[in-house]
Amino acid sequence: MERYYEFIQQRKDQMYSSLKEIVEHESPSHEKELLDQLTDWISNQFEKLTGGKTRIIQNEHYANHVVGEIGTGDKQLLILAHFDTVWEKGTLEKIPFSIKDGIARGPGIFDMKAGLIQGLYALHALKELGTKLNKKIVCIFDGDEEIGNPSSQQLIENEAKKSEAVFVLEPAMSTEGSLKTSRKGVGIFTIKVTGVPAHSGIDPEKGVSAIEELADVIKYFQSLNDYEKGTTLNVGTVSGGTTSNVVAEEAFGELDLRVKTKEEFDRVIPLIKGVKAKTKGAKVVIEGGINRLPLERTKEVEDMFHTAKDLAEKHLGFELTEKETGGGSDGNLTAPFAPTLDGLGAVGDGAHANHEYVVLEEMPKRTALLAMLLETYGK
Ligand SMILES: [Zn+2]
């Protein structure tokens, strides 16, 4: 098992230059042209490094996705990495790729381009060291994770159904490098309130303010927060009204719901959907629902974590820890169908934040860990 780490240590400069290349290829979730260029780059790198084959899933509006396959077998393992980032085009000029004191920076480097590169090099190591597996390895590189997988959800779920285990190369939890063995489920809702417009100076009593009604709805949603259960509701955007001297006819909001279990979704969603207007003449319409189910820490997930922990301790000499997170990922999509281990990607900090970075010397370790996991589960 030690040979993976040795091999990757010898190839680490090549791995870091691949990291530079992928980071310098900007890929905001809505820039189809940029995304598709990166799709082609990933597809080429995959074939070159792993000896596997790829196919490109074409999309009209969103990124094209890459599906890579290595080996054969009735059974399969699935690896997931998304290549879109939350950073808009041009961010690279403000935060260029850089390495200083063992810290690498650049837009999307932590979430999750470094993890994707680690995945490619883990598979490269398996190929070059001649590891024979009895299972097929399928990799999905999707380009719409940051916007909720509008075009890759089906693809990911279908492959998960065929898989024995899923490895997600999302960043680890902060600098400690913890794996993510529990992720909250996500619900997304829109709130639309309709009132009755009136002149605020002449006959305000004839009006019904949609904004006031929306404020009540927000207060109600806030009251459903249950931090002990891990259930959170956040109305993150509001808009409405026309000008200050008109009683607002319309108001809108967007609600984000996070829960730890499927049961909690079943309990809270009817409360959200059942909200009624308090004032006569006002109307509240709630649309939306579950975006991702939770990744629950089942017995199988726990077993996977312990396998990874043992491998890290025995062969890499470090202690692997686990954490739960409120953030969703591709792992939430696969968890209902196959045991999923998430957070196997880069070690660093600052996902979606200006200080985003990756600890470079952790990359060979994490790459070796993934290679060892694939050897263990692929036999
Ligand atoms: Zn991510």
Image (spheres, grey):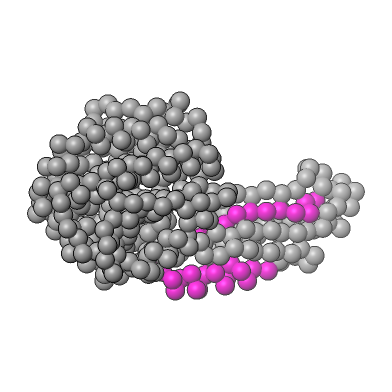
Going by the image, does 253 lie left or right of 225?
right
Going by the image, does 257 lie left or right of 250?
left
Q: Does residue 160 lie above or below 318 as drawn? A: below
Residue 102 in the image, given as x and y percentages of width and height: 23, 31
Residue 75 in the image, given as x and y percentages of width and height: 28, 68
Work out which quarter of the rendered image holds the C terminus and state it. Answer: bottom left
Going by the image, does 246 lie left or right of 376?
right
Which residue corresponds to the image point at 45% horizontal and 25% vertical from the top-left? 93
Residue 340 in the image, given as x and y percentages of width and height: 32, 63
Which residue corresponds to the image point at 44% horizontal and 29% vertical from the top-left? 92
Towards the viewer: 262 or 117: 117
Towards the viewer: 306 or 196: 306
Magenta stretch holds residue 183: no
Region of the chain picked out in magenta, as a range: 247-276
Magenta stretch holds residue 268: yes
Which residue corresponds to the image point at 14% horizontal and 48% vertical from the top-left? 129
Residue 104 in the image, given as x and y percentages of width and height: 30, 32
Which residue corresponds to the image point at 47% horizontal and 31% vertical from the top-left? 91
Q: Does residue 267 lie above or below 155 as drawn? A: below
Towards the viewer: 212 or 310: 310
- Count of marks, rendered view: 0
Asked whether residue 16 is in view, the answer is yes
Asked whether residue 351 is in view, the answer is no
Q: Does residue 163 lie above or below 234 as drawn? A: below
Residue 287, quarter of picture: bottom right
Going by the image, does 140 lie left or right of 371?
right
